[in-house]
Amino acid sequence: MTTKRVAMLLLLVLVGCQGQLPGGKAGNSGKSGVETSALRVTTITPERKEIVRRTQQPGQVDAFRRAPLFTKVPGYVERFTRDIGDDVRGPRYDDDEKLIEHGELLAELSIPELDEQIREKDAVVGLKRAEIDQALAKIKVAEAEVKTAKARLEQALAEVDRATHEQEKWDSEYERVVKLAQNRSVNAKVVDETRNDLQAAQAASRDAAAKVEAAKAAIAESEAYVEKAVADKAAADERQRVAEADLAQTRALAEYRRIEAPFDGTISERNLDVGHFVQPAGEAQARPLFVVVQTDVVRVFVDVPEMEATLVDRGDPASIHIQSLAGREFAGEVTRTAWALDSTSASRTLRTEIDVPNPNGALRAGMYAYVTIVLDRRENALTLPVTAIRRLESQASCFSVEESKLVEKPLKLGLSDGTNIEIVSGLGGKENVVQKVTPAMAEGQPAESIPAEKGK
């Protein structure tokens, strides 16, 4: 190979590795004497626009409320009045949350043994009421005996007074007669007769006092009878309350023969027929008699990934795309979140719920949905495309072309929508920023700015 051909090959290698300057002139490295071409880069100017951060996730439509209905007591299905797909009406309450109307009857059970128990317990309540009446009568009798005993006491006290006066009279008479006998004015016979009369008066006085004590004892006994009668009446009252409570419990159980709608909604399941024997659910797999779902509002469940979970807030706007309804979209907003991430799944997602009005019933439980949630929004933000951002560890920067050289500018970033990113600080807004940064770019590297075409 000739010397001239070797030189030509070396020149081609240099041009292929380092580029070509405009006009076909190679750049000058300044030290090595080898000319290099300037890097041709497409540049853009930071743009002010609205930037919106969204998350798009699959979701599922479910009823706002779902109530599986079971029976509380065993019995036979006597009749049912509603079937699957029927709209039903729930209970109504006044402003004080007091029930004014029961929910619509869905089915009724036949429970003859409960009817017999109600009749039996109703009779027991009647018996307890009779016991109360009897106790009241005993109270009246005992109170009357107290009055009689008090009257006897008054009579006995009056007799004591009379006997006392009589005794005092004969005491005085006896003293007088004794003195007369000492003076031999009366004989011994008069003294003996007077002594006998005095002793009779003393005996009468003692008898009157005994009657007083007997009357007091009779009063105490009668008052004790009154207290006992009152206690018996109180016990009869308690027995009546127990009997009435027992009757009320049985009547409450009898009310469970009526299967009623718990709220306004639609029946989505019916698992009974006339003549079926049904009984309370004894295991988790037991099938409900009915399932009622609320359909005027539905819940859309979405699992938001961990990286976006902290951005989800109540009230965030959302759009729900339903593929099975020819792509129809529904508007809603985030109503509630689980707050905690699901640690049982590998994806670590945040359960998010969106309530969507469904007055026409177009949305049905179980439908698959694609949900877009607006996580954040910035008005008039200074932005760059994400391709213009270089990230090294925690530092972000971009390159601008100034005086035919690359200048690296540290940036503070804000909200990103995946295509563009908010520039919080680091740029003034008039720089010629490299549209697509590459790992080979470096500070001070010669560069030629080629403005990007509008719309690209």
Image (tube, rainbow, N blue to C red):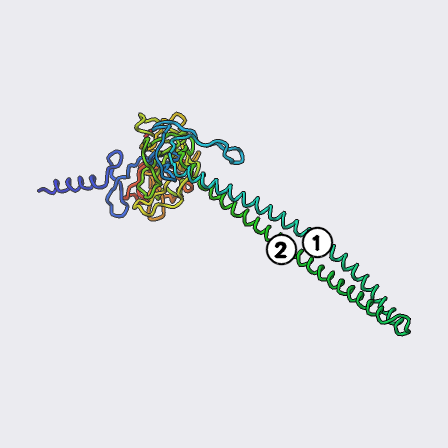
Q: Quadrant of residue 129?
A: top right
Percent position (x, y) of residue 319? 38, 31
Percent position (x, y) of residue 162? 79, 59
Residue at x 63% of width, y 50% of height? 142
- Residue 224: image tag: 2
Percent position (x, y) of residue 356? 40, 31
- Nearer-the-camera pick, 331 or 92: 92
Residue at x 66% of width, y 56% of height? 218
Identity of the amino acid at label 2?
Ala
Query: Which residue was labeled with disc 1?
Result: 150
Residue 140 visible, this angle: yes
Looking at the image, how many numbered discs can be counted on the residues?
2
Identity of the amino acid at label 1?
Lys
Q: Is residue 167 left or right of 276 when viewed as pictured?
A: right
Q: Is residue 146 above or below residue 289?
A: below
Percent position (x, y) of residue 379? 44, 34
Q: Is residue 396 left or right of 137 when viewed as pictured?
A: left
- Nearer-the-camera pick, 402 or 245: 245
Looking at the rendered image, the disc whose residue lies closer to the viewer, 1 or 2, is: 1
- Nearer-the-camera pick, 44 or 325: 325
Residue 248 visible, this angle: no
- Residue 44: image tag: none
Q: Quadrant of residue 187?
A: bottom right
Q: In the picture, which quadrant includes the C terminus?
A: top left
